[in-house]
Every structure is written in C-alpha cells, then in structure tokens.
Image (tube, rainbow, N blue to C red):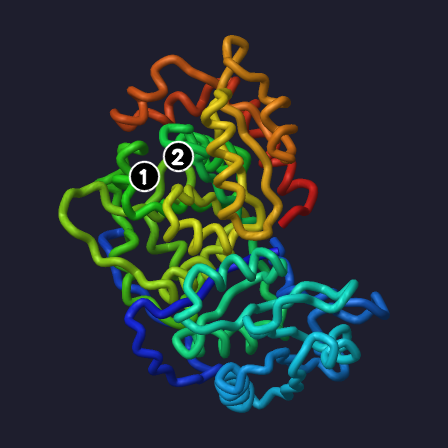
Amino acid sequence: MSRQHIQDGNGSGAYQVDPSRAAGGLPTAGAAGKRRGAGREYQGDSTEPPWLPAEGTDVLLVTSSPRLQAETERIVAALGAELRTAASAEEALLLWDSAGMVLLGSDIRELPPRRRAPAVLLGLAVEGDNLWQLAAALGAERVAVLPEGAAWLAEHLSRSQAPEPGGLVLGLTGACGGAGASTAAIWLAQEAAAHGVRTLLIDGDPRGGGLELSLAAEDNPGLRWPDLADAKGSIDPEQLAGSLPTAGGFAFLSWPGRRDKAAQPDALAVAAVMDAARRAFELVVVDIGRGTEPLRGFAWDCDRILVVSPAQLRAAVAAARLLQDLPPVEAALVVRGGKGSALDGSVIAESLGLRLHAVLPELRGTAAAAETGRLLDLGKRRSVRRFAAPVLELLEDGAA
C-alpha cells in the first residue's frame, strides 16, 4: 500500500485542474511490476480485468467541513466523476463498500466498523502535525492538504481508474545517527541490480551531504534533486529513468555532494518524481533520513520500511521512538552487528514488535569506504549478499 503526502511548498494554492494534461518535461543534463491499488479491493468475476471501472465507481467524501466539501466538489466536477457525500461515518456506512474511492475529512476521527481505510485523508494546512498523526491512526494511504494539493488530488483521482504498473518502494531509515541506513540502502540497490532487477536508489535526506559521495559518483552525468525542483504534474517514467545517473548497475537520484545551497523541490515535485520512479523501476530503494521533513515525505510513499538499528540498548530505545513517527505501513527491523554485539537482534525485534528482516554485517573499513566512495567494492562481499537476499525474496514473492 503506497502512501504519500501532498503539500504545496509555495503556499499559493493556485492550480488549474486539468486531468488530461500531457506528461511534464524534464530538464536536460549532460549525456546522460505491479503497483498496489489506491486502497480499492476488486472482487467479483475473476474473468473481468480488475482495472475496468465497475458499476457505481464513484468517489465518496466523508466530512462535515464546508470548506473541504467545496474544494473536493470543484475537483471532482472538473474530472466529470460522480461525488457522493456524507457528513459522518455513520451516514457513510451504507455507501462505504460500494465507493470506488473513499476520501475522509480530518474532522472525522473514527472509521465505521470493519470498513477499509480511506484512500486519502483531506485536511487544511493549519492542522499541521495533527493531520499526519490522524492519518497514521486511521490507516489512510495518503494525505492531501487543501487547497494547496488540489492539482495532485485531481491527478490521483483520474489515475485511480486506470491500470498503473509499478515497482516496490522500499524505505530505509536509521534508528539513530550512524546506524548504517545509507550503507544498507546502497548495498540493497547494488545486489538487486546484480540480479537483473531494474533498480533506483533515492537520496531522501537533503541534509545528508549527498549520497552520491559514497558511490564516488558525484561527476556521473545525470539529474540531481535540484534539477527537478520545478517538476510538476505527470513526469514520463522512461524520460526520468533515462535522465538519471548510474553507478553499480543501478540508477540513482541524489542531492549534490557540494557545499553551495541547492534548490529544494516542494512536496508536489517530490510526489511527481516518486510516482514516475515507481512506474519506471521494479525496485525503488529510498534512503529516507531521520528528520521530520523526510519522514513526512518519502516515508508515506513507501510500501515497506526497514528500520536500521545497531545492536545497542540506546539505539533500540531510539528505534521505539522513531516507530511513532512512521506512517501506517509494514515495517521490519534490520540490526547492524555481529556475534560481539551488546544485544541480540531477535530480542530487539521482539521488544519493538517488529519482524527481524535481516542482519547488516559489521565489515571492517565500512566507515572509511563510505568516506572514500568505495562502498560498492565492499558490497560485493558474500556477507553483504546474504544480507540483501531477503529483499530479492520480497520481489520474487510478488510483494510489489
């Protein structure tokens, strides 16, 4: 179940809702599956293609907020879709299961019993952190801040009735600083690419110094995040894939490893890039970072999240706190350590209520390799391949 949040960075709220717009163009730079549904379960005759609109595929909006209702009515009307409204969860009970998509206003605090989670939680910018906390509590797939996110919501609704293949988006975040999430992300991307999986590594931390430095790929031609700062609407997946730099057999999208200030893509640009990335690659590995901004952005677009933690008590406590900030998406634990570690990985996983996904090996010289751009050399070790094997199993099991 993919998740993302949408919020316009410039706060203008001025959008032209045009569901038929062409794919957005990308800036040029030097020479350069199966997606989960939008919260809809398809049932009935198995001979019918699941992407064909069923009778009564409409949009259900559950809110008593006049402002949210007016904004949503405007968007849905522009798309030519049918909108049904209900002022409360109780009133929506009979319409819930038959609706093609359920939009929930932030004024609704509880779901009807035994009903699927809403596809999108709608709210206003003034609600701040409370909006994401509510979305996590209700299990909402995505969050849209209105009116700033109106253009994204229109595009999301127009795409929801069409087949949209895509790969698995796997996020990694460290329980504490220096946990090894960036190293793990690089090695996972490298091993997947070695097995012929079309893979993209995304640097999700604008304050992380640039993941490309650990790849010794800062001079490799292709787009970086600042080049995509003005991206809006739909981005052609193949155009994006062909414009990105490569290293270790996989494509990557990094913040530049330079000291000068770089342009920051807003949330709409990030959402457009992530959507195109999902459709262009079989596996998208995201080094999320640990700050509030990356967790709100990239974490909500992940199908799975791996929390990387050293086998230490303080790191385990930090991991428990971090889990409270993650979206309602399947999470698992990666423990960095070995036989001489202070704590056993299975004990840490049990205390956190997470499945132990893998053990990240402690290799001598890893820190130096990250500083000198030689992590890809260490990634060829047998112990690293064993660590990465479970990710390939996710793909083989059809988890995407």
Instruction: For the residues labelled 1 and 2, say whether their Cβ atoms are less than 8 Å apart.
Output: yes
Is 106 situated above or below 383? Answer: below
Looking at marks 1 and 2 on the same chain, the residue that comes earlier in the sequence is marked by 2
Q: Nearer the viewer, residue 50 or 320?
A: 320
Q: Secondary structure at mark 1?
A: helix
How far is the residue under mark 1 from the one under mark 2?
A: 8 Å
**Amino acid of disc 2:** Ser
Residue extending farthest to the right is 45
Which residue is disc 1 drawn over? 211
Above or below for 397 versus 231: above
Residue in view at x 54 percent, y 30 percent: 334
Q: Residue 281: x percent and y percent? A: 50, 51
Residue at the disc numbered 2: 182
Q: Is residue 246 left or right of residue 283?
A: left
Closer to us: 97 or 134 = 134
Q: Position of residue 153 (x, y in %)?
A: 49, 75
Residue 247 position by quadrant:
top left
Q: Is residue 190 above or below residue 136?
A: above
**Residue at 50% in and 55% down:** 300
Q: Quadrant of residue 174?
A: top left
Q: Secondary structure at mark 2?
A: helix
Along the line of sight, the residue nearer the viewer: 29 or 299 = 299
> Which residue is pictured at 47% across the width and 62% down the height?
5
